[in-house]
Amino acid sequence: MQSSTAAPSADLLHRLFAPQRLSIGLSLPLLAEGNIVADFSAQIALAKHADELGFAALWVRDVPLNSADYPDPVGHLDPWVLLGALASHTQRIALISGAIVLTLRHPLHIAKGAVSVNTLSGGRFILGLGSGDRPPEYAAFGQDATERRKTYARNWDVVAAALAEHPKVVPDQTPEHAPDFFLLPTPDTTTPMLAVGSGGQSVDWIARNAIGWMTYHREPEQQRARYNMWRAAVDRATPGAFKMFGTAMRLELSDDPEAAPTPIDLGYRTGSKGLVEVLKEMRASGTHHVTLNLSGVRRPLQDVLGELAEHVLPAFHT
């Protein structure tokens, strides 16, 4: 069996997540106002532009099925297909799954996808894992939604074993004379595993098992309390260690850079100057990474990315 002595890219993790610092990513797809159909050739071009402008990460969702009952009408590509394309068309920006639905995919398929994207991207991939927030999908995939918590933890262990520094494939069944299996290719770096949402687990479980915890946006006092809870769990699990805390935030960027921040669902409508102040407050309260979900965009998306790169990123990326 070929074993790996690789470790997560220290440069990647340090650029993204560090104490008293905040990095800024983007959630794909990037869509103009009123558009629910993504031109994925345009998405690749925007991803390349974001890479050149210095954004820290691109986040890719896993939305297996659509339904008229779901609030998100966007048709998302399969995440592994999109991540492969992004890996081939970008150079420096981190690629993060936000999040692969761990409970609806076989964990060995997830591990294979992770090592593949990590290899294609030259070690720029972080595997974000979630349990899905749409219970009807469980029945469609023949899964029991009431077992979500157990399935998530069990599948996490299988993926973690396959992506470890000394990887091991844990098969579902081991009949007599079954061969030993392993995953190829072997990347030069291992793939960090990030919890996106709770997956039905306790915060202590997440602190023990993940490199960090990514959550959705909350009001400042709630988010500060959330971080304090996380920091306490990390100190219980690995005293003194650093583990990232991040959030996904919806952003409606005003045409007026002086426009003051106004709360909207899961984020803010604000001008670029107000956004800097919002993000500074988030950094001070313990947030290490924010991925922006741009919405309500009336201007050309490349112009919006350019404004963020010119007026927001310099306050946080050094």
Image: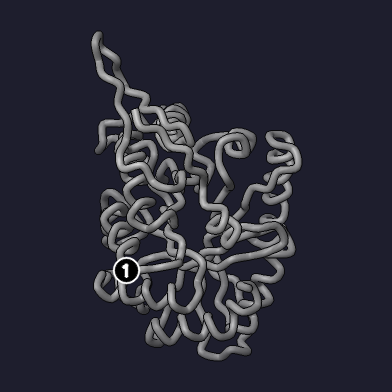
At 50% from the left edge and 72% from the top edge, which residue is drawn?
55
At 36% from the left edge and 45% from the top edge, which residue is drawn?
115
Which quadrant is home to the N terminus?
top left
Residue 125 in view (yes/no)? yes
Instruction: Name the one closer to the observer, 313 or 186.
Output: 186
- Colouring method of the image: one colour
Question: What element does badge 1 sit on?
Answer: helix
In the image, residue 133 sits, relative to residue 284, either above or below, namely above
Residue 118 picture location, percent across and down? 38, 51
Tally of numbered discs? 1
Q: Is residue 38 left or right of residue 297?
A: left
Q: Residue furthest top?
A: 176
Q: Quadrant of residue 20?
A: bottom right
At 64% from the left edge and 80% from the top edge, which residue is drawn?
274
Q: Residues within 10 Å of mark 1 (few under 14, many from 20)?
A: some
Residue that carries the numbered disc 1 in the rendered image: 89
Q: Quadrant of residue 310?
A: bottom right
Residue 76 in view (yes/no)? no
Residue 304 picture location, percent across and down? 46, 83
Which quadrant is home to the C terminus?
bottom right
Instruction: Name the one closer to the observer, 1 or 311.
Output: 1
Residue 66 picture location, percent across and down? 26, 53
Say what amino acid the circle numbered 1 marks: His
Q: Is residue 163 left or right of residue 312?
A: left
At 46% from the left edge and 30% from the top edge, which residue is drawn?
157
In the image, residue 94 sits, relative to residue 207, either above or below, namely below
Q: Is residue 254 left or right of residue 140?
A: right
In the image, residue 193 sits, relative to residue 258, either above or below, namely above
Instruction: Name the one closer to the observer, 175 or 261.
Output: 175
In the image, residue 170 sits, relative to residue 139, either above or below, namely above
Residue 134 picture location, percent across and down? 37, 45
